[in-house]
Image (cartoon, grey):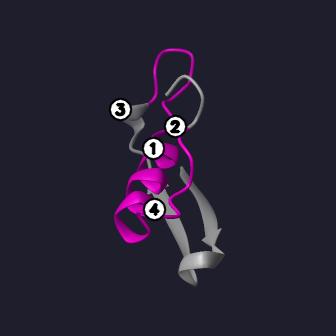
Amino acid sequence: MCAAMNAPVPPAKIAITVAVTREPGAFDDDGLYSNGRDALLRQVGAHLAPNDAPPTRPGA
């Protein structure tokens, strides 16, 4: 399985795209998996555009 997301950061004149692939071991017994792409996108954004990074999710 592959999942991707992107976030434009207009003030920094960049767009960040993250694609994540999952191996079968990433899924639990119900076929669910964690959303690591969201955290990864926000970490990359904070590194590339520290003054305009994508905001953190509530409760994260």
Left or right: where 36 falls relative to 15: left
Measuring from the top left, give residue 37's x and y in whole percent.
Answer: 49, 48
The residue type indicated by label 2 comes to Asn
Residue at disc 4, secondary structure: helix
Residue 33: percent from left, percent from top: 50, 29
Mark whose residue sits in front, 4 or 3: 4
Position of residue 36 measured from the top left corner of the image (x, y, whole percent)? 45, 41
How many tags in the picture? 4
Residues under labels 4 and 3: Cα distance? 28 Å
Q: Nearer the viewer, residue 33 or 46?
A: 46
Q: Nearer the viewer, mark 1 or mark 4?
A: 4
Circles 2, 1 touching at the beta carbon (< 8 Å): yes
Q: Is residue 54 above or below residue 58?
A: below
Disc 1 residue type (three-letter) = Ala
Badge number at residue 35:
2
Q: Secondary structure at mark 1?
A: helix
Of 1 and 36, nearer the camera is 36
